[in-house]
Amino acid sequence: MATWIVVEDRAAACGGCVSPPNTFTAVDSHRMVIALGVDETILWDQFIYSGAPEEFAWILPVPSSQVVVELASPDFIAAMDEATTPQVRPASVPPCDVATAGGGCGCGEFGPGFAPGPVDGVEVYSQAVVGPYETVTLGSEDPNALFAWMAGNGYAFPQDHIATLDHYIAQGSAFVILRLRPDASVSAMQPVRVRFRGFMGTFPLKMVVVGAPGPIDLSLWVIGEQRYGSLNYATTTVDSGDLVWDWATNTSNYGEVFEDTIFRNGGRAWVTEYAAPLADSELAELLSTRALDDFTAARAQVHYPYVTRLRTRMSADYLNEDLQLAIAEDSTGIDRELIAQRDINYECNEAATAGVTGRSRGNGAGQWLLLAGFLLLVGAAAPTRARSWPTRRT
């Protein structure tokens, strides 16, 4: 899975002002955008890779051999994330004596020299050089032949995942394989935009988990004409009534609540964190100024674009089905801003707190703990708590 750079969103404030929001950016999250057009589907994927350039490779099942791979703006997914990431605010102004803080897809290995050799039963549809990448689109009706082609061309696809190839071959999929050119460095990596004909409402999660042990963080933005959710996984939202604001650190327990929301759904759920029309939004303004080509491509496929942000942290064992996207039963929009309904470590004199009601006061730090490693709560370092994932249902 990819590793993502975290950009802090912090602002200075004084006592008596509204505390800056706690903004959340997923770390080690595979981030993807999909625009669901009637005639064409577009997938954006971004790579951040720190290994040897010659060992990077990416494989994507697609429903047709008619595929176009293009470079995308480095700012496209970053802008999507920036404008839709949840922000938690306290329900009231800070107390007088508290100062606010200042300040897709499977990966494998290719050997050197990308010159695809022929293998009986495998058809190479196209080859191209796209920026720093070499790409090839191929197909086969035999997963063993496809595995032999990858092995013969230096692609170390795990042999115990041949059944995954067979799964997509049975659906009539072709495969796009992308890697860095021999003379390109990791620093040259850019996100890609993949176009293919038709409407693809199924997302290839089975390929995403190849070679990815343990829990996986996934962020997916769906650009359609309505709010979208999952048909075959639970789709849920965070309950703001569970959110607690800690005045000692100016952070909330959003990370813990996010994890618990998935856990309460059997460990097999997607959380909708944002849903709104694209027109006249903060997101539209960001995209039009920072990633106009990608913004134009997305709008060309969807006449009245509506953006849904779906995110999960799920055990690889639960990602045993491709994600089937469907129009959400609940069409209500979801704002990125959340208000914590309780607070702790709110210490001040009675005169300063007179008339302030509806809060639950704590008696010290440590009344809630944040899960380590998967979500970074900007502006605060948090203690950790272990999570026991549910036993997989059979």
Image: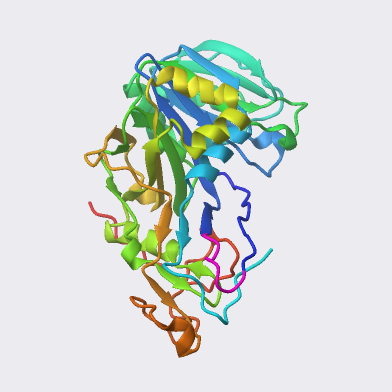
Q: Quadrant of the N terminus?
A: top right
Q: Which residues are magenta?
A: 14-21
Which residue is painted at 40% across and 62% down in the image? Answer: 339
Q: Which quadrant of the figure has residue 382?
A: bottom right
Q: Which quadrant of the figure has residue 156?
A: top right
Q: Is residue 279 visible?
A: yes
Main SS category, magenta section: loop
**Residue 178 in picture, x, y percent from top left:** 59, 26
In the foreground, 105 or 355: 355
**Residue 351 in picture, x, y percent from top left:** 47, 87
Labels in figure, total: 0
Which residue is painted at 33% across and 75% down in the image? Answer: 358
In the foreground, 108 or 374: 374
Q: Viewed as shown, does residue 72 lie left or right of 142?
A: right
Above or below for 285 versus 236: above
**Residue 367 in picture, x, y percent from top left:** 43, 80
Q: Which quadrant of the figure has residue 256?
A: bottom left
Q: Is residue 105 visible?
A: no
Q: From this viewpoint, which residue is outermost toward the right?
A: 183
In the foreground, 164 or 267: 267
Is 194 in the magenta? no
Above or below for 86 versus 290: below
Is 17 in the magenta? yes
